[in-house]
Image (cartoon, grey):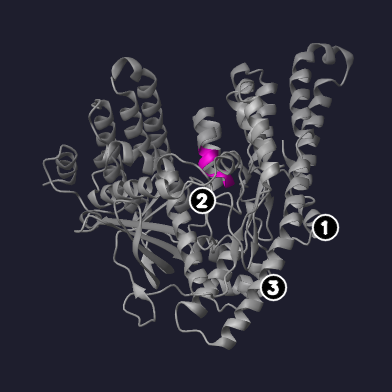
Amino acid sequence: MSIERALKNYLNCVGPKVKDKDLFPIIGEDNNNALISTLFVLANEEIDDMDDSKALDRVVEVLKLMENILRNGEGVNRKIVSKKILKLYEKLDRNIGEGRRKYKNIRKVQSEFNKVRRELDVLIELNEEKDNKPFEFVSYLMNEVKNLPYLEYTFSKMPALANVKDKDEVSLFRHLIRNYLRSVSESNDEDIYYYNNLIKLILSQKSFQLSVSDKKGCLEEIYKYVDQLSYNKKNGRKNRDKINEVSNVVNLIKGFDDVKEGIHQIASKYNIHVSFDENQIKNAKLVHIPKEGVMTDRKPVSDYLVSIDGDDAVEIDDCLSCKKLSNGNYLLGVHIASVLGYFPYDSDMVQEAISRAHSIYLSRVYQTKDHDFKRTIPIFPYDFSADKGSLKEGENRFARTYYFEINPKGEVVYETFLKSIIKNNKRLSYQDANDILENGSSNTKLQDTLYNLKEVASLLEQKYKGTELYNRVKESNEDVSELRVKKIGSENIVYQCMLLTGNRVAKFFADNNYPCLYRVHEVNEENNQKLQAMIDSLNTTYGGDSFKNLYQLIDGLYPKGWYDVKGRHYGLDLDHYCHCTSVLRRAADIVVEHALEVCYDKEPTEEELIELKEEIDKKAKEINAKQSPIEYFVKEYQKKYHR
């Protein structure tokens, strides 16, 4: 049977799945482009035949076969691949636009289309990455495809493309300005409109960087062209419209701030470390990940694991598993990346991370020493936090696993903490997970895991409520030092599981009178009542976004949490709580992992407990002292560079 027939049978649910290994005998320079065409033809047919009840999971699986071709195939015509992906994107958008007349259950159809769109995102990124010619790729999109919505979507998924250069180190933006001037010179109104809007689009990208020399070079080319248009009065009058048009672009370029300049100067004022020294970068690259069959003191975990994060998450530091037991209880597994599985606690790498307090998320990107553009100042080099230590899909990683058996009342009836080796079976965005929770999945393990997690989260929600004011304030604020309070869908699942873990780990230390770095929160009850009265009095006046802005204002008045060797968390309404679920992004979580090494993994001696208490007290003061400088740094950076 031909591959095309086998694929068609699978899509029609009358044949088995075509696996990657089935493609290997026919992958080759003469066959891979034909295979790609076949895959796209079949995907288009399935989308054309879409109805309200149809699921496109099999289309996604078929498109995943193309990943194998793009990774292993020689002679792939990548421009054709880009064009076919673009056409499929456009078809999805067109069908959704027409869908209100065509489909009864438009939300279900849109959810299925989004699954295909996310797989196309993967393919377009892989196509550009494997080709290793990003300039030619984006230049082709910019000058031949000329589709602004698609370019905007491409930049949102691959932000680095806004800063690519050709083989002579001439930037994409410089080429764009030249093409724009050419269109003005030729009086091509359609191209003038297109390139003008594309200039605005690129300048608006958070990832875009315009160096001082590039800005100067672009302006010099424009001024030279204006001089040619107005070398005498007669020509000046004749070309007045062109000169006015070009002057608008000059103002756009002049108004663009060069983000590279100043970040280190601002950071040094607040003792913020932006870069890492050479030894730390080298050690991050030399990290060895766990291999199958190698003896270790860690327990391999065979459960089906999923991670759920934002679309732009780089550091994946937690996974979840959940299954229903024969006694009616649930076994929830919370699996957290283990920093101390790779580096000793007293190593320079770990101590440098703790000194940084937590990763810093900026409003605009900055340029690193390696000339990459980043929005985050991490506590570990990216080679570790975003690669070797991150819980990437399909790869073994050292972890801390927390198992909780939870009864139908939401009570923890048994728990155990393990040093583990895990493998993330499926990485999901919040939207991916929400789609499956609403519409199901052909992957039964994935579907059952998410359904069980949703049920457990509902049980835990009855136990872990927190105070209403705390929840309202935190829901309206992006505070990386706290859990993100979002009580809907998959975000609620993550919130409840991390909250449970922080509470139970802290309770272990408290019950045994062991030292722990607690997250503490206290509120003056009189001030709390005044804040609540303010909200009640404005409740009828404010609405929608204005009401959300009210809570953002109150956040400046509402007390923040801090770290201490004792104390309860008023906002969460918990006697004991600690941060232990984000070791790749928060220093306190590493300190708690160290405390588990001393107190949970073995029986601690009195001397070890005394030493641990002194260490935790010291780190609490250091991390707390770092919070204000970080806040001031972020505010000054945002004030200078945010547009």
Q: Nearer the viewer, residue 524 or 87?
A: 524
**Is 499 on the left-hand or right-hand side of 87?**
right
Tell me the magenta residue range: 154-160
Q: Which mark is residue 618?
A: 3
Camera-side residue of 413 and 40:
413
Which is nearer the N-term, disc 2 or disc 1?
1
Horizontal and vertical percent for residue 255?
Answer: 78, 33
* Residue 244 rendering spot, x and y as whole percentages: 78, 18
249 in magenta: no
Distance of label 3 from label 1 (alpha carbons): 23 Å
User: For numbered disc 2, what is the local secondary structure?
Assistant: loop
Residue at x 23% of width, y 44% of height: 442
Whether residue 199 is visible here, answered yes or no, is: no
In the rendered structure, the answer to whether residue 571 lies left or right of residue 96 reads right
The earlier-in-sequence mark between 2 and 3 is: 2
- What amino acid type is highlighted by mark number 2? Ala
Q: What is the spatial separation of the Cα atoms under label 2 and label 3, in whole angstroms?
A: 31 Å
